Image (spheres, rainbow, N blue to C red):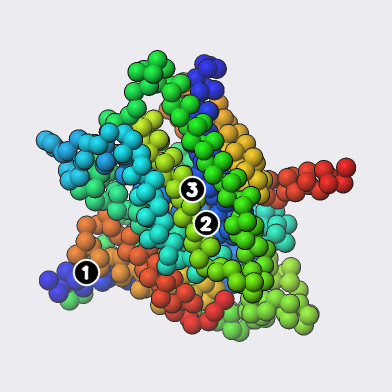
Amino acid sequence: MSILIAQYLVAGVVTGCFLIVATLGFSLTRQVEGFLNIAHAELLGISAFILWSLVNLAGWYFIPSAVIAVGITAVLGLFIGRVVYDPIRKFGPAVVLISSVGVAYVLGGGLDAVVGTGVRTMDIPLATSYRFFGVRITDYQMAVIAMAAVTGLSLALFMSKTTTGLTIRAMSDNPELAASRGIDVVKTSRATWLLSSGLAGLGGVSLALIATLSTDIAFQQILTIIAVAILAGLGSLYSVLIAGQVVGIAMDMSVLWLPAGYRPLIAFALVIVVLLVRPQGLSGKST
Amino acid sequence: MNIEQLILATATFGSLFAVMTVCLNIQYARGGMINFGTVAYFAVGAYTYAIFTHEPPSGLDRYVFGFDFPWYIGFLAAGIASLLFAVLTGWPTLRLRGEYLALTTFAFAEVLHSVLLNERRLGNGSVGLSNVERIDFTQFGLADKYGYALAAVLLLIATIVLCRRILASPYGRAVDAIRDDEVAAQSVGKDVQRMRFEVFLISALPIGFAGALYAMITTLVNPMLFTAEVTFFVWIALVLGGERTIKGAVLGTIALVAFEELIRNFHFESVRGAEIASSIEHMMTGVIFILVLRLQPFEKIKTWRAAQ
């Protein structure tokens, strides 16, 4: 029994690591651009399918394909931010939030039109599993964990050590003050779009490693991404690391006691409880 | 293409969804509440109707409740159930503002969807309930398809009259005052929390009735019919019609339903063709949505009219 629990725990940690990468970009957008980008998850799907088509159809190696996929997704995100969101920012966050639903429709519909429905698997070697004290873990699962660790660490370094990182943080704390201190708001906003969409791209790569792909996958992810972001407190980056693990582990461990169909429900039950008891989230900062 | 069928379908489903858009309009434009879980109240109405009118389970059925009541009791129960669900979800959440409220209502709708999908004892889980009891319009000398179109239009008219009445009353002006300036409304003794809650409840009732009628028309209830897509559809219709007026909400919905029915009426040679068409329909809906929000044509018409 304890082995079984440990096994589910490992699965939960892997899900949590994926959720961390997927949510960081979402939270970053919320922090700097000030709205909830429902279309964020569609970028994950697009990145995953660019990767899939490069590996399966063009026959490329995995790593260069992943780099290209992340790059294209980042540029696409920047493009959408400039063309769609920037001109309507003046109407307030509610309008931008609702517009992002429209963007999600366009991206999701586009993906459906190009790829078509149905389940796809990546053309990569089968996962090798390793045993540690009786608990199995595959090399792809380890890759997802490593990716989350590297992403979290480099994001923390980027935000605290580089000028661009510092301006992003200044913008998210107080946009007026940042602008009056001579920070180039437009440039910073573009850097944020590149960064957050690039993170969505990385999330797509993780997704391609651990899940079978279908075009409706993006929509399923937005639900858990929102759950993680709320648990973390909207607009907080470091608490995303903890919140991602909490949601991932809670979801996968719940399978021990509840039918597997209820897995997404766990994430949402968490959202409701958190919003009712502690609306400011784990970070404790009120937004 | 069958023109009569197109018009009938647009009238039936257009009116049905317009009931939801009008209610959402009250919640958003008048009450300032972003409800991203509209589908939940619709689903509660439909499922309650189906459970109340269904025969008791037999054979392979997994559902436990089936009361075999006549349709009008089921219809009333649907409205009441939707109201009760609004009490359950509105009471704890309405102190949240803006996007937090949007996310909580969205979460409630997803939880309900997940329960309906997994809990076989309620409505056969993912299989759903089929052969739902419906009104027999032939006894009034009316073909079913005309009868249901008529019923949907009547429900829409009743909803509009209800909303108009409320909004034109002193109560409606108090609601407007709260939206415009919460502090000022509070300072003249309006209970903001309570009024917001009441608006939320009142607007849930017609959505429940619409759910019951929807169950009659489709003759089945199934979790797949009640996904977040419905919520987004209603939101798009609301934005399409301009946010502030009942007329706009109704016209926006009818236009959107007509557009969808028109595309559904084309015949496709292959499955792939139909698939591409439906994805392009999705994309077009999204583009229209973005453009309407961006260009704000209704605001412009309003200022133009005012200038005349």
Give x and y (percent) for residue B13.
49, 32
Mark 3 or 1, closer to the camera: 3
What amino acid is at disc 1? Gln
Quadrant of the image containing the C terminus of chain A: bottom right
The N terminus of chain A lies in quadrant: bottom left
Sequence-first tag of 3 and 2: 2
Closer to the camera, A283 or A166? A283
Question: Label 2 lies in what chain?
Answer: B
Q: Any mark on residue A7, and which? A: 1
Left or right: residue A271 compared with residue A133: right
**Image coords of residue A209 (percent x, y):** 38, 58
- The location of residue A21, given as percent across then percent down, is 46, 68
Q: Secondary structure at mark 1?
A: helix
Which chain is home to disc 3?
Answer: B
Task: Tell me the residue at 36%/36% (across/down).
Answer: B215
For the residues beneath circles 1 and 2, the answer to whether they share a chain is no
* Residue at (53% x, 81% y) in the render: A285
Q: Secondary structure at mark 3?
A: helix
Q: Which residue is the site of mark 3?
A: B231
Q: Is residue B24 above or below residue A24?
A: above
Circles 1 and 2: CB atoms closer than 8 Å? no
**Amino acid type of the residue tagged 3 in the rendering:** Thr
- The disc at residue B199 is 2
Horizontal side of A17 relative to A168 (left or right) equals: left
Dot 1, how many residues are within 10 Å of its Cα: few (below 14), some (14-19), or many (20+)? some
In which image quadrant can residue A8 be found? bottom left
